[in-house]
Amino acid sequence: MIIDEGLSEIKAYFKELQLIEEDQHHPLGNSGRVRVSPKTEEEISSFLSYANTKGHSLFIMGNGTKRGYGGLLEKADILLSLAQYTGIVEHNPGDMTLTVKAGTSFQEIQNYLAPYNQKIPLDPFYPNHATIGGIISANDSGPKRLGYGSARDNVIGLRMVYPDGTLITSGGKVVKNVAGYDMNKLFIGAMGTLGVVSQVTLKLRPIPKYESILFVAFPENNLEEIQSFAVKVLDSMIEPISLEILTPTLAGRLTNNNQYTLLISFEDVKSSVHYQEEVIRSITPEKTTLTSLSQNEATIFWDRFYHQQPNGITNSSSTVAVLKIGVTNLDVIKIVKETELIGDSCHVSIEAHGSLGTGLCQMTIRGASDDVVFAIKKIREIAVHRGGYAIVKHLPFSLRKIVNVWGDKSPYHFLFEGIKQKIDHNQILNPSRFVGGI
Amino acid sequence: MMSVIRIDTTDKHIINLASIVSGARSILYKKVDLLAYDCDGFTIHKHLPKAVVFPKNTAEVSQIVKYCSENKLPFLARGAGTGLSGGAIPINGEVIISMVRMKKLISVDLENRQAVVEPGFVNLKLTNSISDKGYYYAPDPSSQYCCTIGGNVAENAGGAHCLKYGVTTNHILGLEVVLPNGEIIEIGKNGVLDEPGYDLLGLLTGSEGTLGIVTKITVRILKNPEGKQTVLAYFDRVEDGSQAVSDIISAGIVPAALEMMDKTAIEAVEAAAFPVGHPKDIEAVLLIEVDGIAAGIDEQINQIVKVCKKRNVREVRAAKDEEERGRWWANRKTGFGAMGAISPDYLVQDGVIPRSKLPEVLRKIAQISGESGLRIANIFHAGDGNLHPLVLFDARKPGEIEKALEAGSQCLKACADVGGTITGEHGVGIEKREEMRFVFKEEEILAQTNIREVFNPDNLLNAGKLFPTPGRCVEIKKEMKA
């Protein structure tokens, strides 16, 4: 813990660093007694090396959208903010690769790439604020993962600052690489517990020439019918970029139609997109309603979609939780249905969406604290019963101490502990932020 | 279980191992039988194993591993032995655990697009088992007719079509693994994505059998693309061919495959078993495949033809039917073996470069060829910058093996120097251990061996692979100081 002399020592050592003392409580926790905002990799490295020697603990933060994601300590000694460590390091349009500093916001990168007709093929929530470092560290992904994969499929290189300040490069700048262990995978989704992501190298994709979204709404809320329709779509040769089921609550908010809705999106050359839309029209069951959005309208919809979840920088008066659930693909339908019943019995409102092509489901739960906690417990039970898991992506600090954010330890948790111990022996990075108290 | 085979040795380890694996020919230990296992697809280094055991289930693998671990016997796993970097060579006299008897297709779930296989299951058999339903398994290394999916996981194998669909790691959903102490763990249960915790699936895939032995694999399967078209383009100048590669990608097209062969490679494939009549006087041939929704393919093909014409293509045309497309691919996929038609021996390298550096690196490789006096043919997955320089030599001539190895290493240096890497899909094995230093600093190698220690603390499992030897490292340091 930092005492006053410690603080003045840091100030003396790191004159060039922006240093702010923080004494306010944040409802999401994951704060620091001091906030440090380095602007260069050298500053990150020398600061980490210093903290490691002194045994100061650090929380790492970008713009704070994931502040409510894990963490059992209200404050660490230091809050290391990467919000000022931003910018494009290298873009090779011909190679379609990009290297960027961790604190750069996702939207800023996409805006930079747009004139080159290129994009990062990820679709995280809150793109305006979420930083690339945070997206990679939390392995955040949205409905388009079905078509484009996730961070683990698109990150080709990382530069990490290890707790002792050492710079470690994993992967490289080429799109295919099997030299040594695939250490990128270890750092993606590690919640900043193994090192500070400094630079990220990604492979890019061309911006699609045309895009559209189809919404198929099922008025009778007949989930068997939704399933058999989804199976038909999946077994056809069309290539949707996303195939997402929306609960009536979420569909109501996003499409003004309070019914179970399948969101099917396409991105390709125009002729291909139109052809695929026709295929969907030809197999859509009777009594369903089909609406579509294309080009700009689709972009506007997606923007609303990525802002529908609460996150670490939105204010909320009621208790809000966001869950991420993983199950076998089509079990998403069952999870969504069973969750609806839990919502009713627990007196909470639940908005959910899940991909029938990846098995990943996200849901927002609102209600009184006790009810939200109970609903999380029930939802986790059904996910685990179906062979999957449920983790809590966003929850106030006071409740994170009651709810086990990551669920039970896995049988091979000792390997996670071994890896953490090898890299961060002094346990200074994001302590207690990750699975099993890592 | 009692062994039914007669063991004709007094070596207690052989006797004890034989009692773990049951059935006829479940253990080999005589020199004459072991000779077939002294190397894999990398034939320059050879070493005899202590024994080869053939377990038939996970429990047997676990017991063998436990026995080896308790008795400090080095051991390693082997699939079909097609690896090209020596990852399965028993350089420490290992007990080889052959996975070939664990070759079942356990289950297929088309609706959820996954299949579960044992590690000895052959890659192409998976696609063959589901193709009638319109599905396939995407990673397609050239050896797919005989290589095993367990081996593919160890090496993170690629193939011609990984430009669009990714390599093995992008298609692995779950693994059952026997850890080096014999413990069995299951990662990615039920093929569910993003299991909480560090991504051990990603770490284990491509770890070249040094972190654990995979005994069951859940893979993602894909629906066949509706349409497919392949284009062939001949270029008089290799620079034009390279530039066309970059232009195609920049035009916003994501081809399923984009392959290139140079003049020497063309000479070889035309002299070998599947000639298709490529002209001998061109410098580069491109094979470009586009797949996806049929309605969108013509537009992309037209654009590719336009790009090639802009880059002075001599001739460009689409395959007129499936038969012609098949012949073009057979000609390309047997490219390595075809070197036998023009050279007694060859050594294949596996560098990767940023696509835009292709002309520069090709010039450098030509220079290396000139200086070494050895011909070098080039076959590449040009779309993702993965080069396979094939160094042609004659092992009967004294000193020529060493010369070929040196030329191969220099090709990798040329790749690393332009920001590339030393292997895209063949792995490091024993072949490229020292070349790891072209791309990783000392502390980056240490960061990786630290991870190995977590899984494999006694380093009995496949020791001496992947990383430069620490001994050598001390010598280098001394040299640097001197």
Image: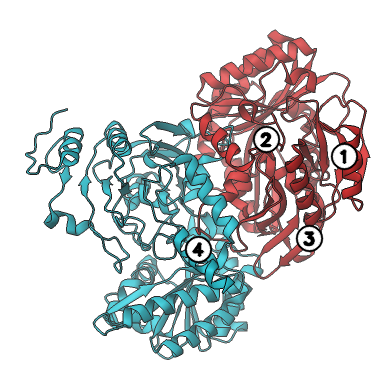
Chain colours: A red, B cyan
- Mark whose residue sits in front, 1 or 3: 1
How far is mark 3 from mark 2, CA to CA?
31 Å
The reply to the same-chain question for discs 1 and 4 is no
Identify the secondary structure beneath mark 3. Answer: strand
Q: Which mark is residue A88?
A: 3
The reply to the same-chain question for discs 2 and 1 is yes
Q: Which mark is residue A35?
A: 1
Residue B198: percent from the left, percent from the top? 58, 38
Position of A366 compared to A148: left or right?
A: right
The reply to the same-chain question for discs 3 and 2 is yes
How far is mark 2 from mark 4, CA to CA?
31 Å
- Earlier residue among tags 2 and 1: 1
Identify the secondary structure beneath mark 4. Answer: helix
How far is mark 1 from mark 3, CA to CA?
24 Å
Q: State the residue position of label 4.
A: B474
Callout 1: chain: A
- Mark whose residue sits in front, 1 or 4: 4
Residue B370: percent from the left, percent from the top? 45, 90
- Earlier residue among tags 1 and 3: 1
How far is mark 2 from mark 1, CA to CA?
19 Å
For residue B6, say whether it is visible. Answer: yes
Q: State the residue position of label 2.
A: A427
Q: Amino acid at mark 4?
A: Val
Q: Amino acid at mark 3?
A: Ile
Of residue B151 and residue A17, the one placed in the foreground of this image is A17
Position of A239 compared to A160: left or right?
A: left
Callout 4: chain: B
The quarter of the picture where residue A258 lies is top right
- Earlier residue among tags 3 and 2: 3
Q: Is residue B472 above or below residue A399?
A: below
Q: Amino acid at mark 1?
A: Arg
Identify the secondary structure beneath mark 2. Answer: loop
